[in-house]
Amino acid sequence: MAKHGKLRTFLEYAAAKSVLLTLGLLPAPAAYGAGLGMGKIAYLLARNLRRTGATNLRLAFPEKSDEERAQLLRECFDSLGRQLGLFSQMSSRSGDELKQLIEVRGWENLEAAVAEHGQKLVLYTGHLGAWELTSFGFSLLGHKFKFIVRRIDNPRIEEMVDRVRTKFGNTTLDKLSAARSMLKILRSGKTSLGLLPDLNTLDDEAIFVDFFGVPAATTFLMAKLALRTQTPIVPVFSPWDAETGKYLIIVEPLISVETTGDEEADVRRVTTEITRRVENQIRQYPGQWLWVHKRWKTRPPGEPPIY
């Protein structure tokens, strides 16, 4: 079994490395196009993911027709494929070359936050567009920070991906062992922390807040950390902009972390606002969110399963 495991690890790594190297040799538009092609193939093959996506889109957009929702689901797979093309460029291009592939909007919001609070910030994004670019792009533009990741099961692929994520000075922290590290980082005030709070969360780590009008189990950890350490929260997103043919890096105005003395109410208020900002961006770019994730898997007590 161990030998089979090592063989599988190597074969998966070899396949992933070959794809990234091949796409990385292409000009960015061609890499995006090849990624789109892979996304379309994945759409045809991933029956279970299509079923999950269709369920999610019915919940989120009941006012849309079946045809409109089906188009959004196809765009979701396209977006994932295009992000693969971008990731190949992130691994192979210089900083100056990569800056030509992005357009930054709202950077003054980050500059104002840094001027007032220094590097002590919580940055967060959602699984929208090229979410890898939100952390990578910030380090590319000179704002390095530490962010939470779920390590890839294949250690050789994880090592390859981590080299790209940390190319310009970022640091990754393993989600499974990061709780104490996050508090220590924010209390030090010396660096920013990055999180993705828009996925389904287990009961004991979540509160239910509305996401597209449907209660969704959402992590309260980010709000609690920010409130207890009085750390401002900065929403950042990186959707694909078809008009410019570039990925955007959007920095939104800060989310307030003022405390009222009622921590439970404060955590709910901040978590709700964090989720609302994500939903607003998804509504602007509805085909670019990760609809194939079972966002509403954890249900409030007594409610039947959705999937």
Image (tube, helix red, strand yellow):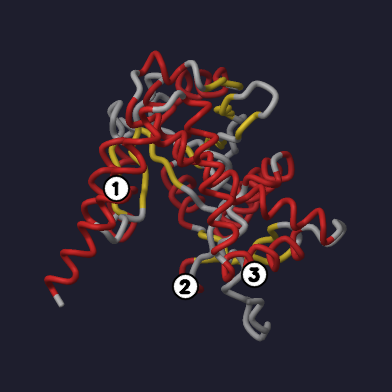
Residue 77, image x, y percentages: 59, 51
222, 145: nearer the viewer = 145
State the separation of the CA atoms marked 3 and 2. 27 Å
Regarding mark 3 in the picture, which secondary structure is present there? helix
- x 49%, y 47%: residue: 227
279, 116: nearer the viewer = 279
Residue 200, image x, y percentages: 54, 64
**Residue topped by disc 1:** 173
State the separation of the CA atoms marked 3 and 1. 32 Å
Q: Earlier in the sequence, mark 3 or mark 1?
A: 3
Q: Residues within 10 Å of mark 3 (few under 14, many from 20)?
A: few
* Horizontal side of residue 223 vs 256, given as left or right: left
**Residue topped by disc 3:** 51
Q: Earlier in the sequence, mark 1 or mark 2?
A: 1
Quadrant showing the C terminus = bottom right
Regarding mark 1 in the picture, which secondary structure is present there? strand
- Position above or below: 236 against 107: below
Cβ–Cβ under 8 Å for marks 3 and 1: no
Q: Earlier in the sequence, mark 3 or mark 2?
A: 3
- x 47%, y 45%: residue: 226
Residue 8, image x, y percentages: 23, 64
Residue 204 bears which disc, if any?
A: 2
Q: Amino acid at mark 1?
A: Leu
* Horizontal side of residue 21 vs 282, given as left or right: left
Residue 106 bears which disc, if any?
A: none
Q: Amino acid at mark 2?
A: Asp
Q: Quarter-wise, where is residue 160 in the image?
A: top left
Q: Amino acid at mark 3?
A: Arg
114, 176: nearer the viewer = 176
- x 35%, y 55%: residue: 150
- x 29%, y 61%: residue: 153
Q: Residues within 10 Å of mark 1 (few under 14, many from 20)?
A: some
